[in-house]
């Protein structure tokens, strides 16, 4: 009986940790996409070619 309770609690904690980790990953992706949009606005297209701009974003 005690083992079942521990297993349920463990599963519950794992699910909560997985949800928190997924939220963190989602926030990081949003942050990077926002930074990229800001960088695209800052780059002067007349100075750099599109190939060079794509190369910068691949790094």
Image (spheres, rainbow, N blue to C red):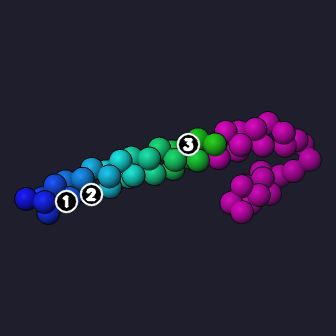
Q: What's the distance in space between the residues labelled 1 and 2, CA to CA? A: 5 Å
**How many numbered marks, from 0 up?**
3
Return the residue at label 1. 7
Rendered residue at 67%/39% (across/down): 34
Specify the farthest residue to the right: 47
Question: Residue 59: x percent and y percent?
Answer: 72, 63
Rendered residue at 39%/52% (across/down): 17
Left or right: where 8 falls relative to 14: left
Rendered residue at 71%/43% (across/down): 35
Callout 3–callout 2 Cβ contact below 8 Å: no
Left or right: where 59 falls relative to 27: right
Q: Quadrant of the N terminus?
A: bottom left
Q: Nearer the viewer, mark 3 or mark 2?
A: 2
Return the residue at label 2. 10
Q: Residues within 10 Å of mark 2 (few under 14, many from 20)?
A: few
The disc, 1 or 3, on the residue closer to the chain's N-terminal end is 1
Q: Is residue 59 visible from the viewing direction of this image?
A: yes
Observer-nearest residue: 54 or 16?
16
Callout 1–callout 2 Cβ contact below 8 Å: yes
Return the residue at label 3. 27
Question: Residue 43: x percent and y percent?
Answer: 84, 43
Left or right: where 37 falls relative to 43: left
Is residue 41 part of the magenta span, yes or no? yes
Q: Is residue 51 visible from the viewing direction of this image?
A: no
The disc, 3 or 2, on the residue closer to the chain's N-terminal end is 2
What range is drawn magenta here? 32-59
Rendered residue at 79%/36% (across/down): 41
Question: Residue 2: x percent and y percent?
Answer: 13, 60
Callout 1–callout 3 Cβ contact below 8 Å: no
């Amino acid at each position: 009986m005690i083992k079942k309770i521990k297993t349920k609690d463990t599963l519950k904690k794992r699910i909560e940790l997985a949800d928190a980790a997924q939220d963190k990953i989602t926030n990081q992706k949003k942050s990077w996409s926002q930074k990229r949009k800001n960088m695209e606005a800052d780059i002067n297209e007349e100075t750099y070619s599109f190939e060079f701009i794509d190369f910068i974003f691949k790094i």
